[in-house]
Amino acid sequence: MESLKKNQDFQNVYKSGKSYANKRLVMYVLKNDLEKNRIGISVSKKVGNSVIRHRLTRLIRETYRLHEDMFNSGFDIVVIARAAAKSATYHEIESALLHLGGPLNILKSFRKEDEMD
């Protein structure tokens, strides 16, 4: 798993990417012409103190790491934690992250044909 680190990379995904949100997380996705995904995680000070922010960052990163094989390759993904994520458990973060992958069509198991049944 590779991380997005540069501010310019984040800005590029915000400007040109597609976004989708749920109660706990916002996800921006942009094709990156690489064979792998790069993930960036943003947790603002509005969400909580540094302990809470780092905990959320670890939860999101670990969720992505464990489910990386479910995601299609070739995307820059930025995940933003919302204030509602502050007290979320691992399973709530996992559910929120996977939920966002569906509408953005970056999950391998999610296909438009499946919806029509």
Image: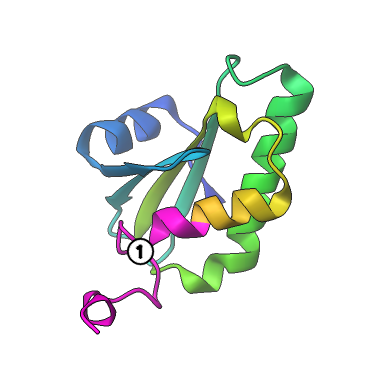
Decide if residue 48 is on the left or right side of residue 111: right
Which residue is rendered at x = 50% and y = 40% of the image?
40
Which residue is rendered at x = 61% and y = 56% of the image?
94
Which residue is rendered at x = 33% and y = 44% of the image?
20
Main SS type for the magenta part? loop
Q: Nearer the viewer, residue 66 or 10?
A: 66
Q: Position of residue 76 (x, y in %)?
A: 38, 49
Up-down relation of residue 86 to residue 36 (above or below): above
Up-down relation of residue 35 to residue 56 (above or below): below
Q: Which corner quadrant of the image does residue 7 belong to?
A: top left
Q: Residue furthest bottom?
A: 117
Q: Position of residue 91 (x, y in %)?
A: 68, 55
Q: Nearer the viewer, residue 63 or 38?
A: 63
Up-down relation of residue 18 to residue 54 (above or below): below
Query: Is residue 1 in view from this perspective?
Result: no
Q: Which secondary structure, mark 1?
A: loop
Q: Residue furthest right?
A: 51
On the rendered image, what quadrant is the C terminus found in? bottom left
Say which residue label 1 marks.
106
Q: Which corner quadrant of the image does residue 110 belong to?
A: bottom left
User: Which region is colored magenta?
Assistant: 98-117
Decide if residue 37 is on the left or right side of residue 74: right
Q: What amino acid is found at the position of numbered circle 1 in the picture?
A: Ile
Q: Position of residue 101 (x, y in %)?
A: 40, 59
On the rendered image, what quadrant is the N terminus found in? bottom right
- Is residue 107 part of the magenta span, yes or no? yes
